[in-house]
Amino acid sequence: MIGQVTGREPSERAIIKVAQSTPSVVHPGSIYTKPADAEHPNSGMGTSVADIPTLLAHYGVDAVITDEDHATATGVATGMAALEQYLGSGHAVIVSINAEMIWGQPVEETDSAGNPRSDHAVVVTGVDTENGIVHLNDSGTPTGRDEQIPMETFVEAWATSHDFMAVTT
């Protein structure tokens, strides 16, 4: 998203380095929490979605966050119609999803009731309603640039975060 908005695309490693040295607004310590075990990348917290605006601001990108639980209070809508409207108006959008669901893998990240839980952030670059496809930039897979996901799968994976999104302002 940073490159999309600013024209300067920092590497994922550079973004992680900034996140490791930037205080979180959500929890004590830095925005990024490294994996406890290098063999298991999901053994750390990574970055809390609520810290996304703080991290983006470091690069001069202003954003607000919303989800189903806070949309009324913040006045920032969420859901597919809002996502399409934001993209159509030129805003960049990051959403939180369950990665295994979009990658077609067995779901490992679940809540206490066994329901899939969000564990990954992606940039939504487009929604093709005619063909039922959502276009993503996904750093979690080598083929993640313009990753094309069936809309039904995307909606289910996104619902695990209560339709969380960070939208540029």
Image (cartoon, rainbow, N blue to C red):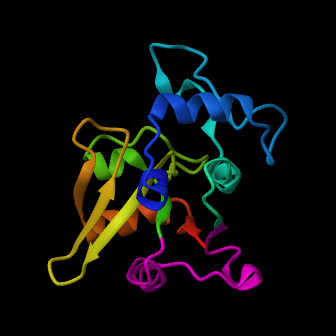
- Of all residues shown, which one is farthest toward the right? 28
* Quadrant position of residue 71: bottom right
Residue plotted at (68% across, 73% down): 69
Residue 39 in the image: state x and y as whole percent. 45, 13
Relative horizontal placement of residue 79, taking residue 129 as reference (left or right): right
Residue plotted at (25% across, 47% down): 104
Compared to residue 46, the image places residue 120 above or below, namely below
Residue 44 in the image: state x and y as whole percent. 60, 27
Say how many tags the image has.
0
Residue 128 in the image: state x and y as whole percent. 22, 77
Relative horizontal placement of residue 42, taking residue 133 as reference (left or right): right
Residue plotted at (24% across, 55% down): 146
Compared to residue 130, the image places residue 63 above or below, namely above
Residue 78 in the image: state x and y as whole percent. 55, 78
* Quadrant position of residue 130: bottom left
Relative horizontal placement of residue 145, taking residue 131 as reference (left or right): right
Q: Magenta segment, which residues?
A: 64-91
Along the line of sight, which residue is nearer the eye, 136 or 92?
A: 92
Q: Is residue 8 magenta?
A: no
Q: Is residue 87 magenta?
A: yes
In which quadrant is the C terminus drawn?
A: bottom right
- Of all residues shown, which one is farthest toward the front? 7
Residue plotted at (60% across, 59% down): 61
